[in-house]
Image (spheres, rainbow, N blue to C red):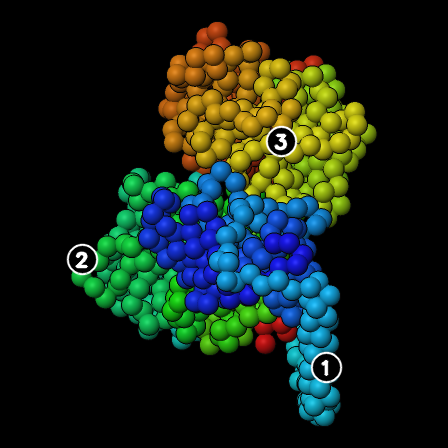
Amino acid sequence: MSGSVKVSKQANFSLGHCKVSPADNSVVFDAESKTDGICLSLQPKFIEVLSYLARHYPNVVTRDELIEEIWDGNGYVGTKALTNAIWHLRQQLKPLNSEQPIIETVRKAGYRLLIAPQFNAEDLVDEPDLLRRAEKQINLLQRKLTKFALASGTVLVAVSALLVWHLYHDEVHLIPTVKQQLTKAADAELYPNVSPDGRWLVYGSRGNGKRSSLYLKDLNSPTEMPKRLTSAKSSELRAVWSPDGQMLYYPSQELKDCQIMQLTLDSNEARPLTPCNSYTAALDVSPNGERLVFIWQSNSDATSGLYSFALKETDSLPVRLSCINHCSHRDRDVAFSPDGRYMAISRRFGNISEDIFLLDLTTGQERRLTTGLEDIRGLSWHKDGHRLVFSTENSGVRNGYLIDVEHEGIQALDVEGMSYPRFIPHSNELVYANYIRDYRVTSLALEQSIPTTSFPLLRVEYSYRNPTYSAIAQRIAYVSNETGFNEIWSADSTGNNRRQHTNLKRRVAYPSWSRDGSKIAFLAPDDQNEGNKIHVLDLQTGNIAILATPYLDHNRPSWGWDNETVIASTDDGITEFYLDNRLPQVLSHIDMRLGQMISSQQLLFTRADKDGLWSIDLSQPDKVHVLISEKKFDEGYNWIATEKGIYFRDNQQGFQLINFWRFNTELVTPIIKLPPGTMPRAGSMGYMPELHSLLLTQSQNYKRDVIRLQHKLLQ
């Protein structure tokens, strides 16, 4: 629009193949689109944002202007609400252009609509710029006068309420933080859940070298031994109660068969309800006991998602609630609100960003509550129905947080190690699994005459992981949380002369050296915290470049043979990215976990759909063959190729091995035996050829017990 034309806020307009109607908050796609006839009903604020951007096309509109115009200048609410609105508009308008977002984020400026809107001629009104500015000033003055009048009218009420408020909060602040240890076994106790009457605690216990099982503990008799509920032949870890406390629902897995089970406690009768994928699958039961929701991926699904199962109906089948095709996220956890109106859902974008969404089950509308979290473990509603407690990891440190779902304010509970929190029904207290896990980089000297073990590389108190070594630079790059954020650091081969290379104050991950030792590729969240991008650090200049990509999610990067390309897996498969900002090229549609070039054309890699170590000739990408069979190799990330062979982790029942597979003999030789859980599943390996030593990511596991928590912020 030009500066001398004004358009009504309620004016209808067209964007490509869809028509937008602000009057009824609808978007209708026409016959030329792939979604012919679909009518979407959006939240009024979403439509207001879209209409405002359309009325100011092609100009960039600042965030402050949008918050001022649409949220009346309320920055506290508007800041996150605007981010949420832009995200939803991009998702809903994807049918107009699946290649790029319809709304562009202009860095440090604001937002701009990328498709020219078409308004009806009768909705365009000529108006002098002076009059428009005057009208805007008058409206702004009216808002300020209204706010002043309201403030004056409420001052007496505020003064009288202030005393009551202070008395209440003084009482709350006097409530101490009290932790009571409920379990004391030597195993790892996870996913605690207390029965509706507050008497029984059910939890999963996973011991070293043993299958996971469910246990029941009587909280009224704390000295009694807990009762084992499930068989030693199957694996179970998390369960939820029926509203009457008579039954438990849980995923159970025996070999490759997984079923959601219903256990009636009085009779100890268990019966299968519906298939599942894993015994760790998240699930919850509605407050009225009529439906079960759980995370599942059927044979026809591209990704896992949220399913609903009717518990009161015979021959019920699961019904998918989540996005089905071209999803930018994966659902991870779910929790019903106490009144059954809402579901809180945690979703993962890419592999390092995760956030919480609120689904209104009455209207079907969703709202994003958080932005840019990491590895959420556990969602639970306070009995007031307005607050959620959750656990998340922030740069290697796990903690608990409380969020107000109406105002979206987040408070830290400052309870380090909190994981899988769950409110005790009808109570202000909760239970959680105490989970503290630090990571460190260790070095393992190979082929020593005296048996040896791995030694910590750095003698520092921080958590550090994901080592990668450059023989040319003679330095080890790794991720450390020394500054309070996960950043890229490096050290020499002895762990000395440490340097910090990034200061992004974001969750960087998975560094990888270029073959010439001049650059480091790594992952970090994008600007919207809705995925990740491949970043490249130039060690000589210190500059960081973001590689051109149309994808939201990228798996671990590795370098091409020419030092000018980076290879990573995307939604389309094995993809090659370029340092000169050309768009990437898909090399193969195989879903790769981790790859490593061992020659100019040969790429070794592990894959998501099959075990084994695989090889592909990039000059003939149809030529794919297995190098090490799945019977000998079931690792995803803990492996490294050297000139003579492959070192890799082998996870056995009750212990771990580091094995070596030799190229010339194709034989596997065990190198060292380690305790179970020493090397995490998502760890990594490096190799220092001049020292003939491995670099490993190792975790330090502490015993995980169930804790009962009383906390002033939970009142």
Amino acid at dot 1: Leu
Residue 692: where, in percent of width, then height? Answer: 65, 16
SS for callout 3: loop
Relative horizontal placement of residue 29, taking residue 401 as reference (left or right): left
Amino acid at dot 3: Leu
SS for callout 2: loop
Mark 1 surroundings within 10 Å by alpha-carbon count, few (fewer than 14), some (14 through 19), many (20 or more): few
The CA span between labels 2 and 1 is 62 Å
Asked if the residues shown at circle 2 and circle 1 are in contact, with their CB atoms under 8 angstroms apart, the answer is no
Q: From the viewer's perspective, is residue 201 above or below residue 561?
A: below
Tag shown at residue 145: 1
Query: Residue farthest to the left?
Result: 314
Residue 253: where, in percent of width, then height? Answer: 32, 46
Tag shown at residue 315: 2
Tag shown at residue 503: none
The CA span between labels 1 and 3 is 50 Å
Residue position for label 3:
547
